Image (cartoon, grey):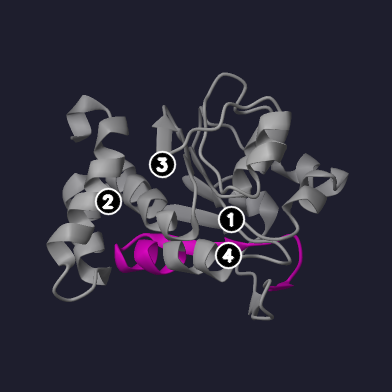
Amino acid sequence: MHIAILTFDGYNELDSLIALGVLNRAGLRASIASPAPRVRSMNGVTIDATTTLAEACKADAVIIGSGISTREVVEDASIMEALRGLDPDRRLLAAQCSGTLVLAALGLLADVPACTDLTTKPWVVAAGTKVLNQPFFARGNIATAGGCLASTYLATWIIARLSGLEAAEEAMRYVAPVGEKEEYVARALGNVTPYLEPALR
């Protein structure tokens, strides 16, 4: 299974790289997809893309990462055209913080409420999407999260959907802090499980 994490210039390291680490440790193949061979984070961390936007649109799941330049991303016609292949009928789609604005701009949240960060909220609302005051929400094959550390919830949801709830629990238990593992696992599952199909709970 391939999960592409869309990562643009000005990206937030926590949003892209936490999910990347959790997903890869769960035995899934997560990669960084960017419109350029190399992108620089909001704090100056430069990473190389390991796949293209075109390949990302063929992945089993896609996470749209967050960053300080997301409004510029949705105004870039070439990037948005490349993302038109993001079809929730064919793959899981998840958005982290300002990544939710990309889903809204693609018209994929027309009747789906969403989560985002507080800075991005006004732009997502202006795009016609109802924003929820919670860290995670999913409906069908679309999930959104608000707040950098909610990236673990997106990872948990994707693992549960692709590999099962037991695999998701194991992945979270592995990365959770020593002495707080039960608390962290319970919080992740508590946020994600209500949005899973009954057969996966």
Q: Which residues are magenta?
A: 20-40
- For mark 2, give the secondary structure: helix
Q: Which residue is mark 4?
A: 32
* Picture coordinates of residue 65, whole percent (x, y): 58, 55
Other-residue count near label 2 (Cα within 10 Å), few / some / many at <14 / 14–19 / ≥20: many
Residue at (67% x, 59% y) in the render: 52
Q: Which residue is mark 3?
A: 136
Disc number placed over residue 65 in the picture, else none: 1
Is-magenta flag for residue 21? yes
* Picture coordinates of residue 143, whole percent (x, y): 46, 38
Identity, as a three-letter code, of the amino acid under mark 1: Gly
Mark 3 vs 2, N-terminal side? 3
Other-residue count near label 3 (Cα within 10 Å), few / some / many at <14 / 14–19 / ≥20: many
Residue 57 visible to an observer of this rendering? no
- For mark 1, give the secondary structure: loop
Q: In this rendering, is residue 142 above or below 57?
A: above
- For mark 3, give the secondary structure: strand
- Quadrant hosting residue 164: top left
Q: In this rendering, is residue 143 above or below 183?
A: above
Identity, as a three-letter code, of the amino acid under mark 3: Phe
Q: In this rendering, is residue 36 above or below 116?
A: below
Could you tell me how far apart the alpha carbons at marks 4 and 2 are, in whole angstroms? 23 Å
Mark 1 vs 3, N-terminal side? 1
Could you tell me how far apart the alpha carbons at marks 4 and 3 are, in whole angstroms? 22 Å
